[in-house]
Amino acid sequence: MCPKCGGLLEDCTSHEEGGPEFMVQRKRCRARDDLIAEQDALKIDRPDAVLWSVRKKE
């Protein structure tokens, strides 16, 4: 397995001319997005000492 993407190593390291083509996808983690927004809005001393968690609203 490729240590960078988790794909097959022989595919990921194949020659560009003869190997497979790849398609990139991007998805946003909405939980992480909300966490970052909350961290940016909160002005506190030593923010690196805060233990954060995210959970779904019920």
Image: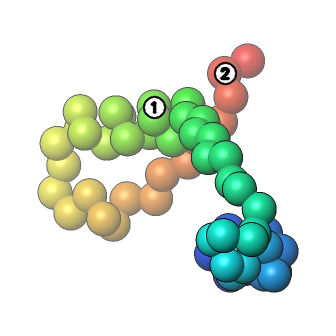
Q: Are marks 2 and 1 in contact (CB under 8 Å)?
A: no
Question: Which is in the foreground here, disc 2 or disc 1?
Answer: 1
Q: Which residue is mark 2?
A: 57
Crowdedness near tag 2: few (<14), some (14–19) or many (≥20) residues, C-alpha within 10 Å: few
Circle 1 Cα neighbour tier, 10 Å, few/some/many (<14 / 14–19 / ≥20): few
Name the side, left or right, on which 52 lies relative to 14: left
Q: Is residue 5 visible?
A: yes
Give percent across and percent down for residue 7: 79, 69
- Residue 40, above or below 18: above
**Which residue type carries mark 2?**
Lys
Q: Position of residue 33 (x, y in %)?
A: 46, 35
Q: For the C terminus, give its image quadrant.
A: top right
Extreme residue toward the top, this view: 58
Residue at 63% in and 71% down: 16
Please state the horizontal and vertical placement of residue 40, each as a whole percent of the image: 25, 39
Q: Earlier in the sequence, mark 2 or mark 1?
A: 1
Q: Quadrant of residue 4?
A: bottom right
Disc 2/disc 1 C-alpha distance (Å)? 12 Å
39 or 17, nearer to the observer: 17
Q: Quadrant of the N terminus?
A: bottom right
- In the rendered view, does 39 fall on the left or right side of 52? left
Please name whichever residue, 9 or 55, is drawn nearer the observer in this view of the structure. 9
Q: How is the image coloured?
A: rainbow
Q: Percent position (x, y) of residue 47?
A: 26, 58
- Which residue is found at the position 58% from the left and 39% from the top? 26
Residue type at mark 1 is Asp
Q: Residue at x 35, y 34 (%)?
A: 38
> Tag 1's secondary structure?
helix
The secondary element bearing badge 2 is classed as loop
Q: 18 or 44, which lies in front? A: 18
The image's mark for residue 34 is 1
